[in-house]
Image (cartoon, grey):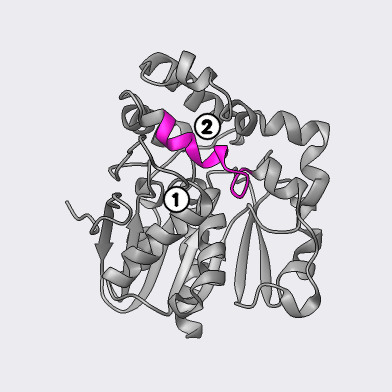
Amino acid sequence: MPFSAPTRGFRLHYERSGRGTPIVLVHGSPGDHTEYSRVVPLLGDDVDVVTPDLRGFGKSDKHLNDVGDAYALSGQVDGLAALLDELRIADAVLCGYDIGSFTVQALARKRPDLVRSLVIAPPVMGVGRRILGERSVDAFLHAILYKTSLVEDLIDGRPEAVRAVLRENLVKWSPPGSIASAELLDHLTENHSAPGAFLAGIMWFRHPEGNPVTYYAAETRPAPADRFPRHVTVLWPDSDPLFPVEWSDTLGDFYRDHDLHIMANTGHFSPVDAPEIWARHILEQVRAA
């Protein structure tokens, strides 16, 4: 089982396959590298595919004592950058959705040498204070709940409670006919049921830089010269209650060079629902290189 060398005491578990142009697939929350298990085989053997588990997820370390900002967006970026440096990966196609999308975008800003282009699904920049609307607050209740001690008091270390919370997210964020719950619920429940495991996975939301509610409420539009510099392919699900399609209207204000593709009949867990679409656009970026 491959693990990185420790960075700030945290090892990252990862899977790696193929040889060629590097591709890095970063999962969401709740999740781990298996969210891309239907995408990886479609990419073939002529690319170098790395699927890590972020700190607090999957088989990666889940420390809780004296961790500082290790689980914050900036801490996750540092851990992922250290893994890519260790694997001697640069100029990669970075891919992610949910917290994985935030992570690869922040990594591209901090370490442009690691990045060729991005393929992402929401969250993207440009949502702004629309996140505070009634429908949005309802959709993002988890981001508020996870900041409270109710996690420690009522959920963490209690497998049935963990399963109930995960099921709520998987079902609520998926359209009818989605296989996300069937594919992920048992696996994620097992991952998050040990004492401390669920808590480690939600620590991301206790830091303002990664919590979508606090991040978007403070978001400002950049000057044109300061827009995101790398090419970005945005894959937007048409049935994601967290990020309605109409929020794609400001992409040009935040990204210099982007393509937008709407994924039909697809919910928030789009790598599970639409692996063929993900694989096709990732390989398009490989060929563009």
Using the rendered view, name the quadrant where residue 231 is placed. Answer: bottom right
Q: Is residue 263 above or below residue 168?
A: below
Q: Residue at position x 61%, y 43% from top?
A: 211
Q: Disc 1 versus disc 2: distance between alpha carbons?
A: 14 Å
Residue 132 picture location, percent across and down: 80, 38
Q: Which residue is mark 2?
A: 170
The type of residue carrying mark 1 is His
| First-in-chain label (1 vs 2) | 1
Disc 1 marks which residue? 27
Is residue 138 visible to us here? yes
Q: Which residues are magenta?
A: 199-211
Label 1 sits on a secondary structure element that is loop
Task: Pick out the residue farthest to the bottom.
Answer: 289
Residue 152 shown left or right of residue 41 in the figure: right
**Which is more foreground, mark 1 or mark 2?**
1
One can see residue 179 in this view: no
**The quarter of the displayed image where residue 6 is located:** bottom left
